[in-house]
Amino acid sequence: MQRYFVEPHRLSEQSVTIVGDDVHHIVNVMRSSIGDEILVADGQGRVARVRLASFEGKQVHAEVVEFIRENSELPVRVTIGQGLPKGEKMEWILQKGTELGAFAFFPFSSERTIVRLDAKKEAKKLERWRKIVKEAAEQSHRAVLPEILPPVSFKQAAAAADSYTQCVVAYEKEGSRTLHDVLESLTEGDSLLVLVGPEGGFSAEEIALAESAGIRPVTLGPRILRTETASQYVLAAVSYHFERIHS
Ligand code: SAH
């Protein structure tokens, strides 16, 4: 069944109002009729099966048939702190990371970041990125719509570590601490921030800064992964570690 994300305030216990691009999708692309059912998610975990009741100009109204309990979210909320990569790699990271269950994305620029975003470019990028994440979340049947935080500096990203149960920095020169060790220390409901460097990686100074903020370096195995692969490895590992029960 087709799924659409709506802003939380638009979904009440009884009904939902859909606005924006989704109206065009429901009416013209899916050619839906009154009485058809769709799924609506508020992006914060509530999902309802709803029946289309009326089309009014730029709005679609639907009545809630039932709220659905879904189990499509990772048991540990994983935020990907991503050193801004070049070109369209970020879009790929957001799309695939959403499919693999990322809770949020936290882009940052660091010493070896090549792209520079001015305020105007940044706003445009964020808008495009949020659209990519929304579509990926709908397609992959997520109940949570991953948030994309506005880009910050590496220092600011490291300073946010305290808001998470655990924060690690993926570092290819780390010899002993593994992701497995970190995941073993987490339980359902915890949150994890993983910092991944841009193409050129992190400098030794940045790793030292992270460590002084209580962020521990972890290895993601004996091979050097491209920046866009590292986050996907982490998300797949979290799924493998925590999602062993399948109905
Ligand atoms: N410039 C480095 C690698 C950078 S890879 C080099 O060429 O040697 C980009 C980012 O992916 C790194 O900053 C790190 O966060 C992550 N990464 C890649 N492979 C990794 C590994 N084996 N272990 C931990 N992190 C890794």
Image (spheres, rainbow, N blue to C red):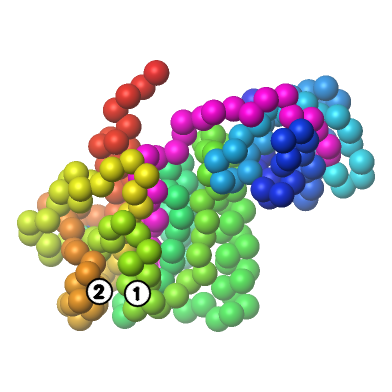
| Magenta-tinted stretch | 60-85
Q: Is residue 124 left or right of residue 60?
A: left
Categorize mark 1 by other alpha carbons within 10 Å: few (<14), some (14-19), many (20+): some
Q: Is residue 107 left or right of residue 222?
A: right
Counting from the top left corner in percent of width and height, residue 148 is at 51, 60
Residue in the foreground of this view, choosing between 134 and 73? 73
- Image quadrant holding the N terminus, namely top right
Q: Indicate whether residue 82 is drawn in magenta.
A: yes
Residue under pointer 2: 213
Q: Is residue 128 left or right of residue 232?
A: right
Q: Which mark is residue 159?
A: 1
Q: Amino acid at mark 2?
A: Ala
Categorize mark 2 by other alpha carbons within 10 Å: few (<14), some (14-19), many (20+): some
Q: Is residue 205 left or right of residue 106?
A: left
Q: Residue 225: name its quadrant.
A: bottom left
Counting from the top left corner in percent of width and height, residue 212 is at 20, 76
